[in-house]
Amino acid sequence: MSTPETAVSTAPVRTAHRRHYLMCKPEHFTVNYSINPWMEPSRPTDTANAVAQWQKLYDLYVELGHEVELIEPLAGYPDMVYTANGGFLIDGRAYVPEFRFVERQGEAPLSRSGSAPPATTP
């Protein structure tokens, strides 16, 4: 039987890796339509709290030495905060979405070109 003094640590060794993140500040975050079961417009969101939580996460990523790129949030597109939906890379090739729901389709040009979508918003 081992004692705390003789016990050998079996925790895996972790190596820090610099990561690269894409984020969008939730300035316009709200739930004013429903395109999935988790979105319920009758349940109010707290945008100020979302911004505060986002800022803590952003600050932590930067403090840990990660690279964070930002997409400018656009009014009328509250789901832009879900930047992982904007595409992904495989072997250096970008794959961008064709959003199914009209409420999100205005985000697609930003994912493709890195510039703002057309001024017309839903």
Image: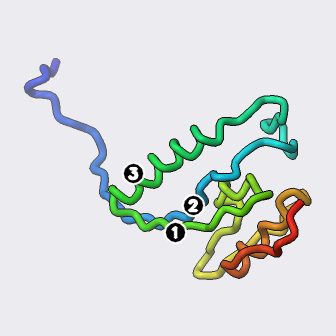
Q: Residues within 10 Å of mark 2 (few under 14, many from 20)?
A: some
- As measured in the structure, the alpha-carbon distance from the residue carrying label 1 to the one carrying label 3 is 14 Å
Kindly identify the residue that appears in the image at 28 percent across and 40 percent down: 11
User: Mark 3–mark 2 contact, CB under 8 Å?
Assistant: no
Kindly identify the residue that appears in the image at 71 percent across and 60 percent down: 85
Specify the quadrant that holds the N terminus.
Answer: top left
Residue assigned mark 1: 69
The kind of secondary structure element at disc 3 is helix
The kind of secondary structure element at disc 1 is strand
Instruction: Decide which of 29, 10 is in the foreground and name it.
Output: 29
Residue assigned mark 3: 60
Kindly identify the residue that appears in the image at 33 percent across and 56 percent down: 63
Residue 113 spot, x, y in % from top left: 71, 81
- As measured in the structure, the alpha-carbon distance from the residue carrying label 3 to the one carrying label 2 is 13 Å
Mark 3 or mark 2: name the one nearer the start of the chain.
2
Residue at the far left: name it: 5
The kind of secondary structure element at disc 2 is strand
Residue assigned mark 2: 23
Which quarter of the picture shows residue 81?
A: bottom right
User: Mark 1–mark 3 contact, CB under 8 Å?
Assistant: no
Mark 1 or mark 2: name the one nearer the start of the chain.
2
Residue 110 spot, x, y in % from top left: 72, 74
Q: Is residue 18 left or right of residue 58?
A: left
- As measured in the structure, the alpha-carbon distance from the residue carrying label 1 to the one carrying label 2 is 6 Å
Badge 3 amino acid? Leu
Q: Residues within 10 Å of mark 1 (few under 14, many from 20)?
A: few
User: Mark 1–mark 2 contact, CB under 8 Å?
Assistant: yes
Badge 1 amino acid? Glu
Residue 34 spot, x, y in % from top left: 87, 42
Specify the quadrant that holds the C terminus.
Answer: bottom right
